[in-house]
Amino acid sequence: MSVFIVGADDLGNIPANLLKAGVKSMKHFKGRKRVSEDIQIPADTDLVLVFTDYLSHNIAELVKRKAKEATLPVVFSKRSWSHLQEKLQPFMQ
């Protein structure tokens, strides 16, 4: 599974935990700078992960719309492994 992560400047132990959970690759977009409509979700993405506590509403809405257009599942979570692990459970095999 390939994950596109949006939000949070520092991911802490989350990348290591995602790898242990079976994620093969991940790309991270911090989302701090102003973004235009041309933000692209990588083509090889299987899941979009949005950290809501470190992201503006505008960017969250934009990413949600782009993921819907690409028919990708989106997980909204706090930047906490315990919270994220629960949210990811339905997507992990």
Image (spheres, rainbow, N blue to C red):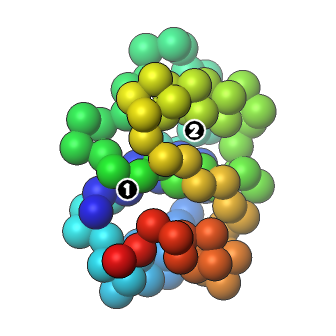
Residue 10 position, x and y percent, is 55, 63
Tell me: 37 left or right of 56: left
* Count of labels in the image: 2
Q: Residues within 10 Å of mark 2 (few under 14, many from 20)?
A: many
Res. 57 image quadrant: top right
Tell me: 28 left or right of 83: left
Q: CA distance from mark 2 to mark 1?
A: 16 Å
> Could one spot residue 48 in this view of the protein?
yes
* Residue at position x 57%, y 38% in the image: 31
Residue 79 position, x and y percent, is 66, 67
Comparing 80 with 9, the one in front is 80
> Could one spot residue 59 in this view of the protein?
no
Residue labelled with disc 2: 31
- Residue 48 to residue 87: above or below: above
Amino acid type, mark 2: Gly
Tell me: 52 left or right of 86: right
Q: Residues within 10 Å of mark 1 (few under 14, many from 20)?
A: many
* Residue at position x 34%, y 86% in the image: 20
Residue 60 position, x and y percent, is 66, 35
Mark closer to the chain start, 2 or 1: 1
* Residue at position x 24%, y 35% in the image: 43
Q: Quadrant of the N terminus?
A: bottom left
Residue labelled with disc 1: 3
